[in-house]
Image (cartoon, rainbow, N blue to C red):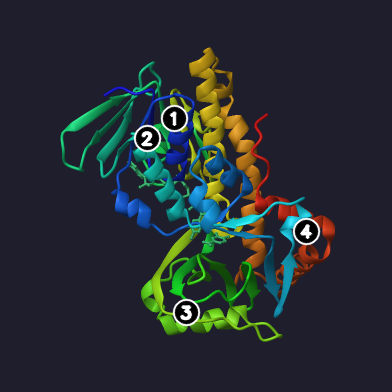
């Protein structure tokens, strides 16, 4: 098999890249080790930056998103039993916080790509990368896990296979530097069949730990609780989850959280991670394969979208004009934006989670930080512009 760009992984990074390449007249093939039903059923992100929404629209895959999303003008930071609204719309000159589930983005992208006749090989096994520093790098895989070994010969390979995929380890160890921070807490996330409790997202810093109230539709709500990183979901009955959510979201004005049946729950760990470089020979890493952020800033999917926009532009310059300059600058250009999102995600995480290693002094500093970002216009502008997403410009 031969293609121009071989893409490993049908997550947001891989699918958004294949759509952009298609629009540019560049061929690609995606290999994905899970089934279509699995990737379309994985519950993860909810908040999209304006730049990601704009990209979906430019690719012609934004119509359901524009109909079904919530476009919020702000969000709330809650601490010491009181809510403080960050008016994102006003503070950023008219931008919105878009709430639309990641698996709906995936469904829209897969559906459109298959209707265009795009090649996505689901449920493959034993994916490996070869000859990355040659003119013709290759991806080997088995169709349906145990079929015959296939070889996909490419001009370029995009490693869009998330944090645990084989692409990043294919860069020789001695040539990459990995920066990492592990947090002592994780997030327990639930989906519940309940009406909306708040018109906008609420990020709450409470003595008992962080809680986040988000939404999916008028009938389905998404909520998160800070838990111990090593906690087991078996320790969390529905009653215990609701009791913690009520406690951590309470206000002095008597905020009312509406309960419903919980139909999905799970715990994710939290880390910050960056791999430098993001490129080796003909291999380019994009999205979670190259970097991870803790979810508090809602940046992971959006970073995947900005990486692949730049990568597509570089590939276009190569195929249309034979220029490789943009591709050569891939790591430098992407990492400038990545590090700023890493900074913001770590700051949000540190500001909002209860850290039991903190001294009483550090706890007071945390509350002062929250007071500052909600009362100073300069600090609120900075928070809002990072939350809606720094420009996806590439210099
Ligand atoms: P992935 O989504 O991980 O996709 C990688 C794909 O590669 C997967 O489909 C995987 O099956 C496939 N793959 C792996 N190994 C192989 C292999 N060997 N061969 C072939 N394929 C392989 N981000 C936001 O922007 N906003 C949010 O609000 C937000 N909230 C979040 C909430 C939670 C609880 C979590 C966990 C994450 C959240 N994120 C958020 C982060 C976001 O979900 C990720 O950053 C995003 O999925 C990254 O996309 P990706 O395509 O790089 O990687
Ligand atoms: C959601 C996820 C996030 O990481 C976040 O910061 C806000 C909302 C969500 O899943 O809705």
Which numbered disc covers residue 344? none
Ligand 2 neighbours mark 4 (CB distance < 8 Å): no
Q: Which residue is mark 2?
A: 116
Q: Residue at x 51, y 48 (%)?
A: 63
Which label's residue is closer to the chain start, 2 or 3? 2
Q: Which residue is mark 1?
A: 22
Task: Write down which quadrant ligand 2 falls in.
Answer: bottom right
Tag in front: 1 or 4:
1
Which numbered disc covers residue 380? 4
The residue nearer to you, when weighing 50 against 380, is 50
Which label's residue is closer to the chain start, 2 or 1? 1
Q: Secondary structure at mark 2?
A: loop
Which label's residue is closer to the chain start, 2 or 4? 2
In contact (CB < 8 Å): disc 2 and disc 1:
yes
Instruction: Decide: few, some or many residues near mark 3? Use Cα within 10 Å; few <14, some 14-19, many ≥20.
Output: many
**Residue 172 image position (x, y, % from top left):** 42, 30
Per the model, the C-alpha gap separating discs 2 and 3 is: 44 Å
Per the model, the C-alpha gap separating discs 2 and 4 is: 43 Å
Q: Which residue is mark 3?
A: 241
Residue 207 higher or lower than 172, as above or below: below
Q: Secondary structure at mark 3?
A: helix
Which label's residue is closer to the chain start, 1 or 4? 1
Per the model, the C-alpha gap separating discs 1 and 4 is: 40 Å
Per the model, the C-alpha gap separating discs 4 and 3 is: 31 Å
Which label's residue is closer to the chain start, 4 or 3? 3
Q: Secondary structure at mark 1?
A: helix
Ligand 1 neighbours mark 3 (CB distance < 8 Å): no
**Residue 270 image position (x, y, % from top left):** 51, 58
The residue nearer to you, when weighing 206 against 364, is 206
């Amino acid at each position: 098999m031969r293609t121009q760009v071989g893409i490993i992984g049908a997550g947001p990074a891989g699918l958004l890249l294949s759509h952009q390449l298609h629009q540019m007249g560049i061929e690609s093939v995606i290999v994905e080790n899970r089934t279509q039903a699995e990737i379309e059923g994985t519950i993860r992100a909810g908040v999209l930056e304006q730049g990601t929404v704009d990209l979906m629209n430019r690719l012609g895959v934004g119509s359901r998103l524009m109909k079904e999303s919530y476009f919020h003008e702000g969000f709330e930071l809650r601490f010491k039993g009181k809510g403080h609204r960050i008016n994102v719309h006003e503070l950023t000159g008219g931008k919105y916080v878009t709430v639309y589930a990641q698996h709906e983005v995936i469904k829209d992208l897969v559906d459109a790509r298959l209707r265009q006749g795009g090649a996505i090989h689901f449920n493959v096994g034993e994916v490996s990368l070869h000859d990355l520093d040659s003119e013709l790098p290759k991806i080997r895989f088995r169709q349906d896990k145990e079929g015959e070994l296939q070889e996909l010969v490419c001009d370029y390979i995009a490693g869009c296979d998330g944090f645990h995929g084989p692409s990043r380890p294919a860069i020789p160890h001695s040539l990459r530097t990995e920066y990492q921070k592990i947090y002592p807490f994780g997030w327990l996330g639930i989906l519940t069949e309940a009406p909306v409790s708040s018109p906008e997202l609420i990020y709450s810093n409470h003595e008992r730990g962080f809680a986040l109230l988000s939404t999916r539709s008028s009938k389905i709500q998404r909520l998160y609780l800070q838990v111990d990183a090593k906690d087991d979901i078996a320790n969390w009955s529905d009653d215990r989850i609701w009791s913690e959510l009520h406690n951590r979201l309470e206000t002095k004005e008597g905020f009312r959280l509406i309960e419903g049946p919980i139909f999905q729950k799970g715990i994710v760990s939290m880390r910050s991670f960056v791999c430098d470089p993001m490129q080796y020979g003909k291999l380019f890493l994009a999205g979670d394969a190259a970097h991870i952020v803790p979810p508090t800033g809602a940046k992971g999917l959006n970073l995947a979208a900005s990486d692949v926009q730049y990568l597509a532009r570089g590939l276009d310059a190569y195929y249309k004009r034979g220029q490789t300059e943009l591709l050569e600058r891939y790591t430098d250009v992407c990492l400038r934006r990545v590090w700023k999102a890493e900074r913001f995600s770590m700051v949000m995480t540190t500001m909002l989670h209860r850290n039991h290693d903190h001294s009483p002094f550090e706890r007071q500093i945390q509350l002062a930080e929250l007071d500052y970002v909600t009362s100073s216009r300069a600090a609120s502008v900075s928070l809002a512009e990072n939350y809606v997403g720094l420009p996806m410009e590439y210099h």
